[in-house]
Image: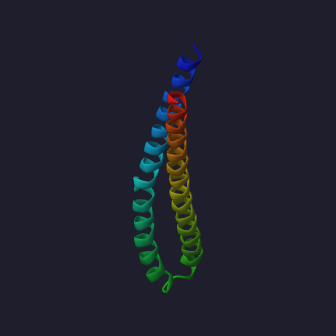
Amino acid sequence: MTTTIQIGMAIILFITGIGMLICGLVIIMTREYQEAMRSLAGQSSRLSSKALADIGVQAALDGAAHLLEAITRLVQTAIGTGAFLCLLGTIICGLAFWMMMMIGT
């Protein structure tokens, strides 16, 4: 009975680890934020050329710069979260493997 519970726990841990690994890779590989950043960078360059002619556009240019910084931090945070999930998933899979090896002895 105890061995069956231990095997079940190891299988659940392994599946959880694989799930975390896949989620982490999906988060890292997703490029949705980077396209928004490229679009904003293109718009801010147009806006900066217009700012030379119009003083009222300067506030909008500052806002676009702050928005670009915020999106850059968002991308870095998403990549960090993805890397953490990959690392944690690998550790949990290793733990499940270790549990199965302990059951076998």
Q: Is residue 84 above or below residue 45?
A: above
Asked whether 38 or 64 is in front, the reply is 38
* Residue drawn at point x = 50 percent, y = 32 percent: 100
* Residue drawn at point x = 54 percent, y = 62 percent: 76
Asked whether 100 or 81 is in front, the reply is 100
* Residue drawn at point x = 51 percent, y = 55 percent: 83
Q: Residue 9's quadrant in the figure?
A: top right
Q: Position of residue 51 (x, y in %)?
A: 50, 81
Count how many numbered circles sit on residues in the image: 0
The extreme top residue here reads 1
* Image quadrant occupied by the N terminus: top right
Q: Position of residue 26 (x, y in %)?
A: 42, 48
Asked whether 4 or 63 is in front, the reply is 4
Q: Is residue 15 above or below residue 90?
A: above
Q: Is residue 73 left or right of residue 41?
A: right
The extreme bottom residue here reads 52
> What's the colour scheme?
rainbow
Q: Is residue 17 above or below residue 42?
A: above
Q: Position of residue 89 (x, y in %)?
A: 51, 44
Asked whether 95 or 68 is in front, the reply is 95
* Residue drawn at point x = 55 percent, y = 33 percent: 102
Q: Position of residue 23 (x, y in %)?
A: 46, 43
